[in-house]
Structure formats: C-alpha cells, structure tokens
Amino acid sequence: MRVRDKMTRDPVAITPQTTIADALALMREGDFRRLPVLHRGKLVGIVTDRDLSEVSPSPATSLSVFELNYLLSRTKIGTVIKKQQQVISISPDDYLEKAALIMRDHQIGAIPVLEDGKLVGIITESDIFDAFIEMMGLREPGTRLDLELDDKPGMLVKVSEIVWKNGGDISHLAVFHEKAGKANLVLQLRTKNIDSIVESLKEQGIIVRPASWKGHAY
C-alpha cells in the first residue's frame, strides 16, 4: 500500500505570517492537530497543537484575557518554525511502511507528502493505524487463525493448499517472526468449516495457537 492511498489530500496549510491565534482557530474548526507551513508554495515547516501550546502564555500568567488574545493575534507562526532544523517529508509513491518507520524513528505523528516539490497531502499515525486495521481485516467478517510453523521455503504454499482443499479462502495474511527458525502466520479466512482446516494443519505439524481476537463470524 502506498502513501497516496491513505494520505489526506490537499491539507489545510498556513504561512509563516499566519498568527498563532488564526492557526489555533483553524485547528479547532477543522479538528486538526497539525498544520503544514508554506512559504511561496514551498514547505518550510509543520506546526502541531503542542508546538503552539508551548509558545503560548501559561494559564498561570497574570495577563488578562484581552492581553492574551492580543499577544496570540500578534505572534507569527514564523517564530515557531525557526526552531525546526529539518522538514521531514515523504513521496506519495513511497510505501506506508516507510512512513511508519520515519514516524517511529523521528518520534513524530505526521509527515507532509510532497510531489515534485509541491505539498499534495499529509499522512498521519491515524492513517497508519487505519491501514493496519484494513490489512489485517479486523473490520471484516471472517475466521482468524494464528499459526506457528517452520520458517522454510514452501510452508506458505502448504498452508494455502490446506485451506483451499478444505473449502476455505484466505482474505488477509500477515507473517511475524518471534523465534529463530519459526514463523507466525496470521490468517483471516472466509470459511464455514474451520474445524477441518485446523485438523489438516495439525496433521502437517503446524501449531494452531489460540487467537486472542476472533473477529466476526463468517
């Protein structure tokens, strides 16, 4: 799955001349947590609600409401993005896995998406979660199996053949590695006869582990 498949297209953006008050208003109105910052069409930063709260006066300040509003209406976003050393971005044709890795490594919750130097979208951690849910079939009907098998060539073909011969259909699949020489295969199946599939898998020496999440009945 590519970034373009899950990103929010044409996100609302601001400029360095936008005031903190206006940026906060945009976030409230659009239920945003972050806004890309453009200068003459070029991405120069991204600000989050946390960034703005850090540069806003403390609730314990002695300033009046009028003085607070005046200060926020005079302070520009440019004063916030000056602290940002590097603007991290990603291409819409990059895989979602790359976006997830960048977010994890840099401890950020979103990445602006650039195509030919132009801002075309934004991908967030929520988008990554939605993609994971979709890839695992968690909102779809089916029967879930958690298998432990030898990590060697041909095992995936063997499992697929067993499922097919017993009238099942694999709708979603994921492979994880927890032990050396072993693979954990998580399947989402369309089937009405799970018992025969389970028995056939066990006959081939494949461990069927109890699933902690059973999904919806097919």
Image: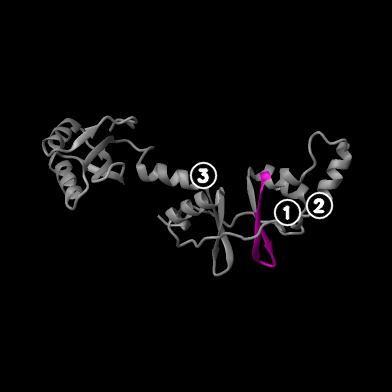
User: What span is in magenta?
Assistant: 36-50
Residue 73: percent from left, percent from top: 82, 49
Callout 2 amino acid = Thr
1 or 2: mark nearer the eye: 1
| Circle 1 SS class | helix
CB under 8 Å between discs 3 and 2: no
| Circle 2 SS class | loop
CB under 8 Å between discs 1 and 3: no
Report the residue marked by disc 3: 126
* Left or right position of 93 against 162: right
Report the residue marked by disc 1: 80
Q: Where residue 75 is drawn, which disc sits there?
A: 2
Q: Is residue 157 magenta?
A: no
1 or 3: mark nearer the eye: 1
Q: Nearer the viewer, residue 97 or 11?
A: 97
Q: Where residue 205 is drawn, which disc sits there?
A: none
Residue at the bottom extreme of this rendering: 116
Looking at the rendered image, the quarter that the C terminus falls into is top left
Callout 1 amino acid = Val
| Residue at left offset 25%, top offset 39% | 189
Question: Dot 1, how many residues are within 10 Å of its Cα: few (below 14), some (14-19), or many (20+)?
Answer: some
